[in-house]
């Protein structure tokens, strides 16, 4: 029997030691940061395919189908124009109010849609999380891609509106490319942040509409925040103008409209603020999400 | 020989607690307010202790059956081994990345079967080139196109048997090291069951260890030499399939 003890040493070992001896890894262990980033990159095709699938899936039952990707932003712009341009007459102080308004709505709508979809990107896909092993950040990121695709449709509409309202085509339009890139990094980070928060605080889904509406009114979408804050102390006005959405919107207006009202910051410093926000939110959101990677299946 | 047994899955005193939201007994707004005011056990969350301290070691080349009555924690345990559901206490150690072959992998009902195949394969981590090459093969295996071109119709138009067959075919398309099978053999009609059993045998030949959750005792008997019987989240018996099944059958008929 002594021989048996020598040939069967396992019962003497604690399970953890046994696992270590044979090189077994703890299941559901959080991967290292670099390894996580690498596996996320390996899943890029899945992220894009999932984003496409969601985009197609939302409109399969509508008779006009994919046409709604263009009709939705157009209708949106028309509604806001009717209320703020025609009924309330906010447009008096701003030349080319239609283009001014549409810039605000489309740019804000992008991040806003990413934020609300990102909040439920974990809780809404629990079945998938419990069935398949993949880097969970794929979910908030694919939500961002879905909305980016819709933004590109909105941008085509916006370019049309800008041309129709008499703005000449300019080289400055090209600055939209780096701008949307920065905004996408910002939104992706925000989606990851809210995805983890939303998986921990389930009531966040109920609170988000109010947060987003407050953000909407504070981002100068329908009016010029700079003229509205004229009477405020400088520090308060500066603080309000650091709002990332306001900065993205103002920069888009600078690119597309020749007659934008002057802003609180210079264009160069707005680019710096936009870059800063993208960096902080992109990296911060990713790190925050990664730290929770192990928890997402628990619900 | 004992010293040739290499462990592939080590489960060490695992507890799994589900948090269930929206399970309040009094679901009126007043009830919610009362719970918050009285600081009762956190508002609408209730906990379900699904697995209570399970430990075992599975070795290379073993096929282990998991049996037990409904709600005994079999599927939950399987998900913990796959690393999909974090253990609340204890730990699961595995060799490589175990794959769960379940019939309820996520599918998008509004998308065509073919798009779901592509999405499912990508989600399993298959490279894009391989996905393209295998899509037709998977659709043929599932047999959904036997009555007309169903693969281009949205999955919501499929019968439950058809979508279960497609899900199984997607999951079975990949090679697995440690393979976890959850009720997948009970899918579809007799013809498809035969085909899927063959496929599982093939997969088993290439896999180190196979776990099989099933209510069909005959398929456990056919595939597994060792069986673990779970009851209310606790291991009731762990041993050779014949002995465990005999005891389980006695338990079931006695009820």
Image: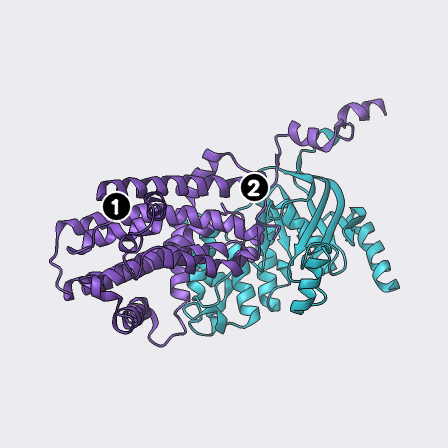
For chain A, the rendered hue is: purple
Against A275, is B170 above or below? below
Q: Position of residue A247 (x, y in %)?
A: 30, 48
Indicate the quadrant where residue B199 lies: bottom right
Residue farthest to the bottom?
A: A63
Q: Position of residue B43 (x, y in %)?
A: 68, 58
For chain B, the rendered hue is: cyan
Against A89, is A12 above or below? above
| Label 1 Cα neighbours within 10 Å, binned few <14 / some 14-19 / many ≥20 | few
| A115 displayed left or right of A7 | left
| Real-space Cα separation, disc 1 to disc 2, in angstroms | 39 Å
| Mark 1, residue position | A178
What's the chain of the residue with tag 2? B
Q: Position of residue A272 (x, y in %)?
A: 28, 39
Would residue A73 be visible to someone looking at this image?
yes
Q: Same chain for the residues at labels 1 and 2, yes or no?
A: no
Q: Which residue is nearer to you in this view: B94 or B191?
A: B94
Q: Which residue is nearer to you in this view: B124 or B181?
A: B124
| Mark 2, residue position | B97
| B160 displayed left or right of A109 | right
């Amino acid at each position: 029997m002594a021989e048996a003890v020598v040939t069967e040493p396992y019962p003497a070992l604690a399970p953890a030691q046994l696992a270590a001896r044979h090189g077994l890894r703890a299941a559901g262990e959080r991967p290292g940061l670099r390894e996580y980033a690498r596996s996320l990159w390996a899943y890029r095709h899945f992220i894009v395919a999932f984003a496409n699938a969601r985009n197609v899936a939302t409109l399969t039952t509508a008779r006009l189908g994919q046409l709604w990707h263009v009709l939705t932003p157009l209708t949106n712009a028309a509604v806001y124009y009717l209320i703020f341009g025609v009924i309330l007459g906010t447009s008096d102080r701003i030349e080319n109010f239609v283009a001014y308004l549409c810039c605000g709505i489309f740019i804000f709508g992008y991040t806003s849609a990413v934020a609300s979809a990102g909040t439920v990107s974990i809780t809404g896909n629990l079945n998938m999380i419990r069935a398949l092993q993949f880097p969970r950040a794929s979910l908030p990121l694919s939500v961002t891609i879905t909305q980016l695709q819709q933004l590109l449709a909105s941008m085509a509409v916006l370019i049309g509106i800008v041309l129709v309202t008499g703005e000449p085509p300019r080289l400055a339009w090209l600055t939209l490319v780096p701008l949307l890139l920065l905004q996408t990094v910002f939104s992706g980070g925000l989606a990851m942040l809210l995805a983890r928060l939303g998986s921990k605080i389930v009531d966040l889904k109920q609170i988000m509409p109010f947060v987003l509406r407050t953000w909407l009114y504070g981002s100068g979408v329908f009016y010029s925040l700079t003229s509205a804050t004229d009477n405020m102390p400088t520090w308060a006005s500066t603080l309000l103008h650091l709002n990332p959405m306001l900065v993205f919107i103002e920069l888009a207006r600078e690119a597309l409209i020749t007659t934008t009202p002057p802003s609180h910051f210079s264009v160069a410093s707005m680019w710096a603020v936009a870059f800063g926000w993208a960096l902080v939110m992109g990296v911060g959101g990713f790190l925050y999400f990664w730290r929770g990677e192990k928890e997402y299946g628990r619900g | 020989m004992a010293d040739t047994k290499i462990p592939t899955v080590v489960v060490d005193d695992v507890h799994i607690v589900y948090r269930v939201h929206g399970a309040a007994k009094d679901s009126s707004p007043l009830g919610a307010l009362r719970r918050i005011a009285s600081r009762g056990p956190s508002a609408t969350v209730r906990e379900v202790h699904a697995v209570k301290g399970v430990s075992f070691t599975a070795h290379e080349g073993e096929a282990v059956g998991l049996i037990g009555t409904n709600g005994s924690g079999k599927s939950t345990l399987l998900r913990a081994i796959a690393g999909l559901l974090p253990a609340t206490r204890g730990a699961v150690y595995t060799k490589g990345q175990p794959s769960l072959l379940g019939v309820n992998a996520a599918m998008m009902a509004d998308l065509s079967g073919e798009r779901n195949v592509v999405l499912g394969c990508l989600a399993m981590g298959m490279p894009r080139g391989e996905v393209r090459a295998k899509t037709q093969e998977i659709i043929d295996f599932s047999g959904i196109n036997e009555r007309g071109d169903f693969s281009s119709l949205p999955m919501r138009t499929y019968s439950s048997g058809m979508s279960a067959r497609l899900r199984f075919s997607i999951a079975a398309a990949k090679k697995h090291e440690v393979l976890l099978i959850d009720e997948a053999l009970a899918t579809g009609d007799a013809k498809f069951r035969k085909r899927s059993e063959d496929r599982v045998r093939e997969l088993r030949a290439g896999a180190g260890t196979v776990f099989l959750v099933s209510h069909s005792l005959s398929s456990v008997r056919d595939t597994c030499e060792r069986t673990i019987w779970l009851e209310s989240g606790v291991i009731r018996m762990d041993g050779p399939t014949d002995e465990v099944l005999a005891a389980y059958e006695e338990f079931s008929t006695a009820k």
